[in-house]
Image (spheres, grey):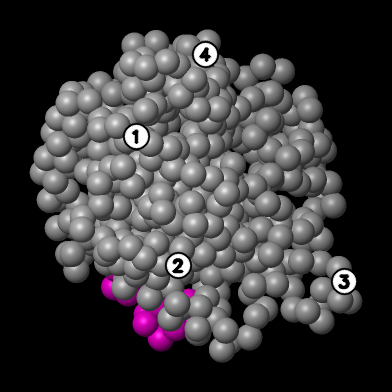
Amino acid sequence: MLPSGADYVLVRFVFQRGLAVIYLFAFLVAARQFRPLAGEDGLLPLSEYAENASFRERPSLFYFYPDDRVVGLTAWTGVALSVVALLAGPYWLPEPYALPASMLLWLALWGLYQSFVNAGRVFYGYGWESMLLETGFLAVFLGAGASHPPVVVIWLLKWLLFRNMFGAGLIKIRGDDCWRDLTCLDHHYETQPMPNPVSWFAHHLPERFHRLEVVGNHVVELAIPFCYFAPQPFATAAGVATIGFQAWLLFTGNFSWLNALTVVQAVATFSDGVLTAVAPVAAPAATAPPLALTVLALLLAVLVVAMSVRPALNMLSPTQVMNTSFDPLNLVNTYGAFGSITRDRYQLVIEGTDAADPDEDDWEAYDCRGQPVRTDERPPQWAPYHLRLDWQLWFAAMRPRPGRRQRWLLELLEALLEGDAGARSLLASDPFPDGPERIRVLRYRYRFTTPEERAETGDWWARERVGTYVAPMSREELQRGGLGRRTVVR
């Protein structure tokens, strides 16, 4: 017998609480980082988005109000609404108010976050941004209160989870040879964007274990997703396998809320019967959803099916592109991760000095929050919180010199030369509160120390300098070279 929405009342409740946690992290990140990155005086100023973008192509509240006060109000409103959603606010209301209140709450969260994604440009160009928006839009139609969710929305969540996982599996098997010869995880833990405290230990696991890991990766991403649509208990088994896989990724790396959000999506593979069998709760009696919600859910399904054509064709194409949206509202997207694995880890280290004619010993490094700088510092845990500047520094380090997409880095250097408080807030430490006299960026190759090296030195990393990414310069030289846009203030 086919399941009905009555089988997913508890599933809906758990899913909504999990999604609220993800939204809470997303808006906290926006509240703390958006203004120094992409606000009025950010590294990529908000006015540039408002002047050059098309609202139809990149809709955002900040298109009409490119103002830091509006940014702050929007971010903290999102934080407050996320807390309301986490505490199941709509469920406190009497019928028939719970359902419209829930829809308005989730629609507001989706719309507010859409503004940050579409105005944040390169700092918001990650697959988990569009994934959160797509998941959040489906959540609008799950309902709340005494009525059960429309079952078609549960199936749309499974379809989203399928594209998330299967797309990641396809991009790997088509991409780097190391996914086919089972050697990618020999390098991944060391070269991933932001290692965490467990990454050093995972890197040093036996090679045979790494081979089994890659095989398991292919099974979970290429075979298991088809079981999401199977009857119970097979769908639950597939969901448990997916959650276990994502938990390992959470345990060994910092991938923002990508893994946590995938875990939330995987809740849709469960049923109330499964949850009541493992937890001391009983599924409440539920009525059928109102006709209006049922009709909206069916229209949503038609829309998603129609908009899934291009993402599905892309996913099946030998020239598959990962993490791409095909519509300005990020309603139905294509996903994928780590189609290629870097073999060497390059790092950018920003250094400043107060000396007019500095020697090598006169330079002092700025510490990053997530990227390694000091070799004796253990990699930190940040996920599901997202350090946007640190991720961009990882991408930039892949190039031997800055390109057009790294204009933000030159703006960062100029801001640090000025002692800008916003730019300094993005870093873990700033040895020059009023700005250094000169600044430079060096490029290093980092690797994890061996167990023997770590036992002898206590270091987590070993590094060697491979070049100068940005030559030493003062504020005046940066301005004269036409590299910065700010007014020099001495």
Crowd rating for badge 3 (residues with CA inside 10 Å; few <14, some 14–19, many 20+): few
Secondary structure type for disc 1 = loop
Q: Earlier in the sequence, mark 4 or mark 2?
A: 4
Q: CA distance from mark 4 to mark 2?
A: 40 Å
Label 4 near label 1: C-beta < 8 Å? no
Few, some or many C-alpha atoms within 10 Å of disc 2 (few <14, some 14-19, many ≥20)?
Answer: some
Q: Identify the residue position indicated by label 4 in the image.
A: 73
Q: Position of residue 156 (x, y in %)?
A: 25, 46
* Quarter the N terminus occupies: bottom left
Q: Earlier in the sequence, mark 1 or mark 2?
A: 2
Q: Amino acid at mark 3?
A: Thr
User: Which span is picked out in magenta?
Assistant: 170-184
Which mark is drawn over residue 286?
A: 1
Mark 1–mark 2 distance (CA, rounded to whole Å)? 29 Å
Residue 241 marker: 2
The numbered disc on residue 66 is none
**What is the secondary structure assignment of the residue under circle 2?**
helix
- Residue 457, numbered circle: 3
